Image (spheres, grey):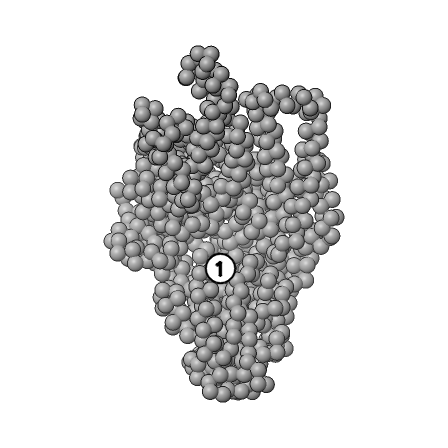
Amino acid sequence: MSIVWKRGVELVLFLLLLSLVSFVFVKLAPGDAVKQMLRLDDVAVTSSEIEQQREALGLNKPVLVQYGNWLARLAQLDLGNSYMTNRPVSEELLGKMPATLLLTGSSLLILLLIAVPLGALSALYPNRVIDYASRLLAVLGTSIPSFWLGLLLIEGLSVKAGLFPSMGMGTPSHLVLPALTLGLTMSAVYVRLIRSSLLDSLSQDFIQGARARGIGSGKILLRHAFRHALTPVVTMFGVSIGSLLGGTVVIEVLFAYPGMGKFIVDAIQSRDYPVIQGYMVVMGAAVTLIHLLVDGANHVLNPEMRLKGEKR
Amino acid sequence: MRKIISLSLFIGLLLLAAACSKGESTNGEQAQTPVKELSFLFNFASQTIDPHLDYTPLRAGVVETLVKLGEDLQIQPWLAEEWSSADGQHWTFKIREQVTFQNGKALDAEAVKQSLERAMEQNPGVKQVLKIKQMEASGQSLQITTVQPFPQFPSELVHPNTAIMDVSAPEPDKKPIGTGPFQVASFTSGSSLKLDRYDKYWDGAAKLSQAAFSFNEDANARLSALMAGDADIVYRPPVESMEMIKGDASLHLDSVVSLKTHELIFNTRHGDFQNSYVRKAFDALVNREELKDVIMGGQATVASGPFLPEFSFVPDYEPKETGLDAARKWFQQAGYEVKQGKVSKDGQPLSFKLVTYASRAEFPLLAQVLQSQAKELGITITIAQVDKYEDYLLDKDDWDLGTYSPSIAPRGDASYFLNVAFKPDGPLNFGTINDSELNAWIDELDQTVDMNERHALIKQALTRINEQMYYSYLVHPNTLVVYREKVKNWVTSKSEYYMLTNVLDVEEK
């Protein structure tokens, strides 16, 4: 229980620090939300009218005062309203979350479907055809930009073959191309990671011991080797989920997929401060929780780690 | 090996399942929906379709404004049949009869009043645009008093965020209720807006029964969507694909001059650019024909001044001499030394900083051409690409020249542009121009109701701007739209405000 309490306090302190740093950096960056709000590119306003609007929003106050005001609202679970849409930031973020989670989940599924069998086969049959093929695939996957791969998939599977829609969302088929693009690109890293991790695992003494005890090779692979090899993979998986949740911007733009990545880039461009701050807090909390889950999973998977923890 | 085959089969099945789900969906839709549907793909995503915050509902034919900008660049009646004012401050608008909102409610002056009040409350920009002090509604008559004499008030009502909607709509950001030919079926923010025909549209029900207004900010992806059959009309396809589009008989390419003007800005806070002859020298250095044909692939019209020549208030500009010799001549007139073709001041070579931005691909290229032209005169130009461009131009003073492309007459009237670009506190007065004579004319224009007098004042101001070369106006860029041959009655509007209309049609399958 004390660990949960300690982690909870750590989480709150981390989020406070994150929100302060992001708030200050966003405010220091050039650009002005008021000019965007007033749509200066087609509205004739004077400099004094811009200043009046800035005052009305409290944007003329010192940054730390603005941060304090924001924090006070956050304490009441109020993330404020978007400057661009006038809607509550919490509603905006919650509205985008399902699309992003769906894309993230599908991409991870494709990643697992490709990387686990290929990485395992590559480790089990080193320097054989399958190993060379998977390594080649891994090199290709890491060197092809995801944006370009996306365009290739659109050209091949949408324009030429007419199998999937090239953009938008709505039906499961809309998800295939963006998820494939992300899944294929990321699986390249995992194929190599699983291969090397499994090779390392297979060379461990406890595997030799298990073999000496006459345990079957299938059981050794699934119960012992894989379990040991999963620790770095699960850790990396946590990082990937975080990056997928926040960083699928290019793919979202290419496939006109209305997720959180694209939304936050638009918010940054228009200096929509409440949205940017709300996003930082929500994503900070989500990524931290994912890392906590990854830690927990590693403790379950790796008895060695569990023992070390107990010794401490 | 068996495992590989199993895995391949599994992935294959996954793809097939997804493909089938698409097929089912499409077939299902085909069975349920009438034949006449159209998919329109735009280049900017909307996060909301509240008409008072976003342009998409007007573009998609969901809402309408009181006044619209015609293709002849004259304002026309729309939801307001007529309007009048004796003093430019007290206005009477007669609201069109027999118009209903898409929920069946009749449109009257009270509904218009409530909608305008909401627009001003929701959008501070609209409040600034309209400058309304008071409104009174009676039947179909709406009396509006502005805070000051405001002769261009009707043209400000062209602004898409002044569109009229039923304010009692429960979800105006997701399902606004307007008077247009299409009503919202569903909206996915940042992705697409699905529309159904509104059968009781006052100007005749739309020929299309359904339409989709989708967004994709990537030009290549937009073209791919057209080629894949996911879109029928695509706004701003990639310029480099024009030849391919022209070679495809099933596609039609529209290239229409826009209401924007590419310009060269001079920082008149700096000594060199306080001299109008120096500004004229730089104006002469730009070869507009080359910019239009080579850099912009022919998709532009050479500019003589800020406004398109179609505007009746545009003066007859004298043709300008361009090239290195013309530039040398202007530098000499400015009092600079020209020896062996090279320009110097007080024996020192000249050096300037030109700032530009990347979102208009032609600007960095134009900057490089200008840099090489200036080099011929012994002038060094350093080029910098900056982010948050407008803020940079206004807040920093370390630049001498800049490129920009403002909307010159978004609502058909010249006073917007003259106020924002030339008045000392104008938010787009990047060059810090402060010409007392010009300021006085703009002030007078803002108080003048008589159209002939207004045109005379605008002409006078434009002539002055040209003589002083406060900005160098280069080209009016074109708007490109590509659509399938089956699409009928599409009009690429200069204003970019009107897209899906009741006459837009597709040939039956």
The residue located at (28%, 57%) in the rendering is B246
Q: Examine the rendered structure and indicate whether residue B459 appears above or below residue B209.
A: below
Q: Quadrant of residue A173?
A: top left
Near-viewer residue (B264 or B41): B264
Name the residue at the top extreme: A214
Name the residue at the left extreme: B249
Residue on which disc 1 sits:
B358
Q: Examine the rendered structure and indicate whether residue B163 appears above or below residue B415.
A: above
Q: Can residue B440 be seen in the rendering of this structure? A: no
The residue located at (41%, 74%) in the rendering is B287
Q: Quadrant of residue B26?
A: top left
Give the percent coordinates (x, y) of residue A67: 71, 46
Side (left or right) of A27 relative to B232: right
The residue located at (33%, 56%) in the rendering is B241
Q: Secondary structure at mark 1?
A: loop
Near-viewer residue (B213 or A4): A4
The residue located at (30%, 58%) in the rendering is B243
Give the percent coordinates (x, y) of residue B426: 61, 66
Q: Examine the rendered structure and indicate whether residue B391 appears above or below residue B168.
A: below
